[in-house]
Image: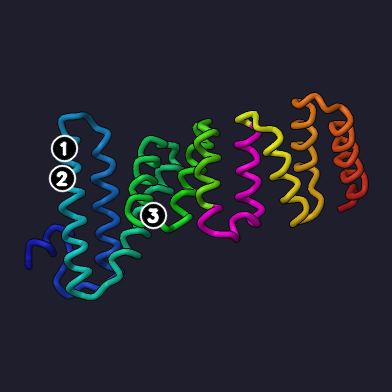
Amino acid sequence: MKNIFKELNIREDFSEEEVKESYLKLMKKYYDELNIDDSVLFLAQKRIDRVDEAFEMISSIKNFDYLEDKYDVLYTICEEYKEKKNYKKALLISNELINFIPIFPESYLIKADILAEINEHEEAIKYFEIAEEMEEDIKEDQYIQYLKAQSQIEAKKYEDAINTLKKVTKLYGDNPFLFFDMAYCYEELGNEKMYKYYCEKRDKYWKDHEKD
């Protein structure tokens, strides 16, 4: 019993927040060590496994929410690696999130976001669409749909991007940046009439909102 407390560097009279905080610190430490060199790769992975096993055992003994706590910790680490532009690590942990609890759309969305940032737009679109199938509200989320449209544009899926952008406009109203993107898509498709139409809508919007 004492070994699992030692593994997480905690006292036996710990709280759920204390054990979760210790688990987060140790997981970050050992994930950081994964990219040092091949000689410590195996050791770092074994440490991660031991810490996770101890965390699961303690959670079971104390009736803590192991699934939610572990998911929160992994998601936090994934976001931190993404913010630091350590995309290799961020993708690694996004995959762990998906494997750990496959039914959470947030895992697919963060992976889509990471893939978009490294210009893997075809793959990013796939993960946006998986998340949409899991949760209907995502199809009406302005920010997520805008990100999806940007990946569609970068992947040269201009007709798909137009459909996504029109849906966002219908849901949230006119937006000059969306008009700009739609004009660009129509220009790339060689549709001069629609290109000019959305350029005019964009310019009219700016003119009507000069004093805003």
Q: Which residues are magenta?
A: 132-153
Q: Position of residue 28 (x, y in %)?
A: 29, 48
* Residue type beneath disc 2: Lys
Confirm whether the magenta stretch covers residue 143: yes
> Is the Cβ of the residue at disc 1 closer than 8 Å to that at disc 3?
no
Between tags 1 and 3, which lies in front? 3
Query: Residue 181 magenta-drawn?
Result: no
Q: Position of residue 142 (x, y in %)?
A: 66, 53
Q: Secondary structure of the magenta portion, mostly?
A: helix
Q: Amino acid at mark 1?
A: Phe
Q: Is residue 65 above or below residue 30?
A: below
Which numbered tag is attached to residue 23? none
At x 17%, y 75%, the residue is 13
The answer to whether marks 3 and 2 mark residues whose Cβ atoms lie closer than 8 Å is no
Pointer 2 residue: 46
- Disc 3 target residue: 102
Tell me the SS state at disc 3: loop
